[in-house]
Image (cartoon, coloured by chain):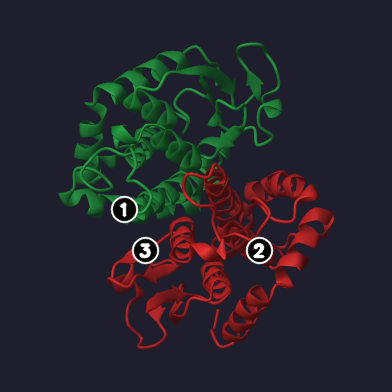
Chain colours: A red, B green
Amino acid sequence: MLQLYFFPMACSLASRIALTEAGIEANYHLAHIWTKKVVDDGSDFHDVSPKGAVPVLVLENGERLTESAAVLQYIADLKPEAGLAPQSGDPDRYRLQEWLSFIGAEIHKAFLFPTFWYKDDGSLAKPRARIAQTLSVPAAHLADREFLVGNRFTVADAHLTWALLLLRPAGVDIAQWQSLRSYLERMQARPAVKEAIATEMALRKTVAA
Amino acid sequence: MLQLYFFPMACSLASRIALTEAGIEANYHLAHIWTKKVVDDGSDFHDVSPKGAVPVLVLENGERLTESAAVLQYIADLKPEAGLAPQSGDPDRYRLQEWLSFIGAEIHKAFLFPTFWYKDDGSLAKPRARIAQTLSVPAAHLADREFLVGNRFTVADAHLTWALLLLRPAGVDIAQWQSLRSYLERMQARPAVKEAIATEMALRKTVAA
């Protein structure tokens, strides 16, 4: 069975959403990304992945895959009938990769990461000054679309849903972009998304910051 | 014919390397990423891409693809016989995606981007404190490998080659990681890589910072 190392409400939530949407069972291991301990057994998370970051997906053959963009595409391709990614050869597959890159680099790494990890105003003024321009890109795209890619839910939506959820604790009110607010409401109304978020919100309370 | 909007020695260099390695002809348009002007005709680069960032690859059908991770995979798939990416279905394809994400997020967006764009010590202390740990990941991986993925040059190598080249002007001497130094020397010895870099270094001198 697949195993996913995650931290509640960290970007690994997108992988849990993808697994839940696809109906793929997995063992979930909580890895404390600040103490770098695996909560199951207190072992060093660096032994699972030298990066010390989630998600880490342990494949059936024991290999470990990291980075949301790769893990999400791997999960989607495990169950093509779930339609969580356009098939390879479909031009929309590159659109999926484009969104995964944009969300991972521009929203997560350029803004959410420094906000939650650096936590001082000197580091944060410039990332904060850029975030509205960054968010205007998906806001414009979603003004007349239900989903990021094509006309169905994909792992890019799992990724963006996570990022939008984290913007509020990061101090950004997405209500100023009507299209993003409605999109997030639609995504949160999906049973699999709701279930994944509820699971992680409950676990989040058990973990000291 | 494909068209690539680039800025000399910006991350679009990886796309030029990929096109050159694949022997794919393209029209190259210099987009000044600071002034947001297309140098050809002085037009607003935001009209090409609202992101105002390179690379932008204009496909044969006129659509515009952005984000290195997507553009590089698109280029690789145009000419499978060049072997610039494992075929879809090959487990190494996810390793390629993993490296593209890591390089784009952890080296580029978390370090090179703030270094070149934010330019003040308050913003940079924390990204700078993290970069050695970040670089230890590819350094360890390349200790006994010639290339990032499998046993041949892929677009992930094009991406990392660009990132390593930029570390020096960003104030990081990669000589402290012997494996990264030898890797970069090997990559720079490839005729296509050498040609792409020489072209952009010459163009870089024509563009005011």
The residue type indicated by label 1 comes to: Asp
Q: Is B122 in front, or is A62?
A: A62
Q: Is B206 in front, or is A2?
A: A2
Disc 2 on helix, strand or loop? helix
Name the residue rendered at 62%, 26% in the picture: B62
Chain letter belonging to callout 2: A
The residue type indicated by label 3 comes to: Leu
Is residue B155 something one can see in this rendering? yes
- Lower position in the chain sequence, tag 3 or tag 2: 3
| Left/right of residue A141 with respect to residue A95 in the rendered view | right
List x then y, in percent, for residue B40.
Answer: 61, 11
- Please state, as top left, top right, bottom left or bottom right, where the N terminus of chain A lies in the image: bottom left
Q: Quadrant of residue B9?
A: top left
Q: How dense is the environment of label 1, judged by Cα within 10 Å: few (below 14), some, or many (20 and up)? A: some
- Residue most extreme to the left: B144
Q: CA distance from mark 3 to mark 1?
A: 11 Å
Q: Which residue is mark 3?
A: A65
Between label 1 and label 2, give the one nearer the viewer. Answer: 1
Q: How dense is the environment of label 2, judged by Cα within 10 Å: few (below 14), some, or many (20 and up)? A: many
List x then y, in percent, for residue A46.
Answer: 32, 70
Q: In this rendering, do the residues under marks 3 and 2 share a single chain?
A: yes
Chain letter belonging to callout 1: B
Please give the label number shown on residue B143: none
Please give the label number shown on residue B92: 1
Relative to B187, is A132 above or below? Answer: below
Q: CA distance from mark 1 to mark 2?
A: 28 Å
List x then y, in percent, for residue A188.
Answer: 72, 71
Disc 3 on helix, strand or loop? strand
Relative to B167, is B28 above or below? Answer: above
The residue type indicated by label 2 comes to: Thr
